[in-house]
Amino acid sequence: MQSFIKKLVDYLGINEEELLERSQTPKKEDVLCLTKYPEEGAIASSFNDFDKAVKFIADGIKANDRIAVYGDYDVDGLTSTTIIHLGLKLSGLKNVGFYIPSRYDTGYGLNISILDKMIKAGYKRIIAVDNGITKKKEIQFLLDHDVKVLVLDHHEEQKNSYPPFGTDNCLIYHRNDVSAACLALVVMERILMDDSLNLKRYVDRMEAVNYFFTLASLAVFSDCMSLNVKSNLALAKLGLIYLNKGVKSQLDPFHQGYSNIAKLVDKFLDRNVFTYHDINFSINSKLNSIARVKGGNATNIGVYYLEGDTTHNGADILDYIDHVSIQKKIIVQDVMNKGELKDLNSMYLMDLSNNDVCPSGLSGLLANRLMDTHNLKRPILVLCKSKCDENYVIASFRSTEEYSLDKIIDDSEIRCLLKDHGGHAQACGFSFDRNNKDEIISKLTLLLDGIQPKEINNPYMEISFEDIGMEAFNAFESLEPFGIGFEKPRLGLRIKREFLASGLRKKHILLPLNDGAFKEKRKIVFFNGANFLDSNDCNDILLIGEMVKDEFRNTVTYSFKVDKALPLY
């Protein structure tokens, strides 16, 4: 019988070189090589200069200038802010501060009212991370007040509308193929490790860089960076390695920071090893929750927490993060139950922009939940009211992989109506004047009506009952991480109705697979499977899901966990 790893590799189309690369531990240089000028993925201009960005920071440290880091409220913004802010403190700078904006009060990116307060407080240099590339007016405001600016950003540039980059007082280091946290990492690594800069040498600088790798690795997943980019793959793998080492080593000077990250995982005390699944579904989810529900200065606590700052009670911050994470789930479920989902033929719409039932920060999560719950095959648009300016609407646009939403909103007739936009093929966000709402909805439905969805070859990898078990689970684990550019295959299992129903336990299906050829315990898990059986009378069923490993009371079970089922007639 063909080994499962061979089947999986063939399905993914991986050659031997790629398989070897994924199985090896990467080197730091695979990430730090980003200091070299890229051929793609960056502003094609002479003013995009890594060495000048490093000099900008080094000069500020030597002059003991008051420096502020201006970040963003998502995981990439929190981690990039933490890397630069903590790195500056470790480099001996005393006069350093940071600011994380509120999604609901000041909104995304540099804000003149906040910058004015920074100027009056005596800040001489501003480092904008994960924002700034499109903020021409705000950067000019700083320059007019003799404040020097450095932008570390990975967002899409707007041609012919750059801020006045290119002078010693206004610099940018940009790539759009990696996260802002990755840019912050490579800059701060040079600041901490390059003796030629003649800066104060922090005694544990190597350990600091390792911790920054872990912080930056979180943003690889939160910002959906492509794992086909070698530096992103290397960063993701190294970050997890350092996290697992740092949590276990109480002698590591950044043990508190590592532990704080680990505590975001439910039942973390029961865990010996933390995984990519933990990063995606626990750590990043909870860090993003901070700014999705609450406004005000609450967003700043994320940086204190990630820095392991002992002047702020980490347990209290964790309690707060857990609280808003629960709030987030309650709000989304309530809107799911009460909101009206409209079928517009070419797409679905949930318009919440005329009330306050759903904070705009939850619109993307709500769209994803609606897609999964209702098994939507066409795109869905969720609209919420902007709390920063009630004249504007915040939109989250989601679809299956058959559509390319980024190309749709890039259409000139749509784009000219938008205030801001961003995202990728299956997940986009944008904002617009509410007076344009009906026109935008109409144009989107017309555009989608004329688009033939892409055909997806092999939407799932078909497996047999014999494939369920330890070998298959280990095969997937050996190829991790999965993500954008290297998606984890969904598995398809054909099963007879009668056999599936034999595992029915009230509303759930827990079907043991008893076979003497296997030493490990195996089963099929289909939560709420009774609903499917009640609503479908087919004899043949296709189960679609993934392989999972469950540990309970020293017993390990390998399960095929069903996400959805399709009747086969």
Image (cartoon, grey):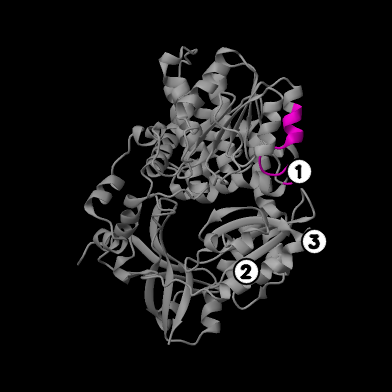
Q: Nearer the viewer, mark 2 or mark 3?
A: 2
Circle nearer the viewer, 1 or 2: 2
* Mark 3 and mark 1: Cα distance apart in space: 17 Å
The residue lying toward the viewer, choosing from 448 and 3, is: 448
Q: Is residue 110 magenta?
A: yes
Instruction: Using residue 92 as the reference point, say whether residue 201 is left or right of it.
Output: left
> In this picture, is 264 found above or below 467?
above
Q: Position of residue 471 (x, y in %)?
A: 29, 58
The N terminus, quarter of image: bottom left
Distance, label 1 to label 2, CA atoms, is 29 Å
Sequence-first disc among 3 and 1: 1
Q: Name the residue nearer the viewer: 37 or 91.
A: 37
Which disc number belongs to residue 355?
A: 3
Q: Quadrant of residue 320?
A: top right
Name the residue located 64 percent from the left edge and 70 percent from the top edge. 443
Give the residue number, with chain letter if any, for mark 2.
444
x then y, percent, for residue 435: 77, 62
Relative to 70, say whether 278 is above or below: below
> Which range is magenta?
104-117
Say which element carries label 2. helix
Q: Quadrant of residue 118?
A: top right
Is residue 405 at least partly visible in the picture? yes
Q: Are marks 3 and 1 in contact (CB under 8 Å)?
A: no
Residue type indicated by callout 2: Leu
Along the horizontal axis of the image, is 472 left or right of 310? left
Q: What's under tag 1, amino acid-wise?
A: Asp
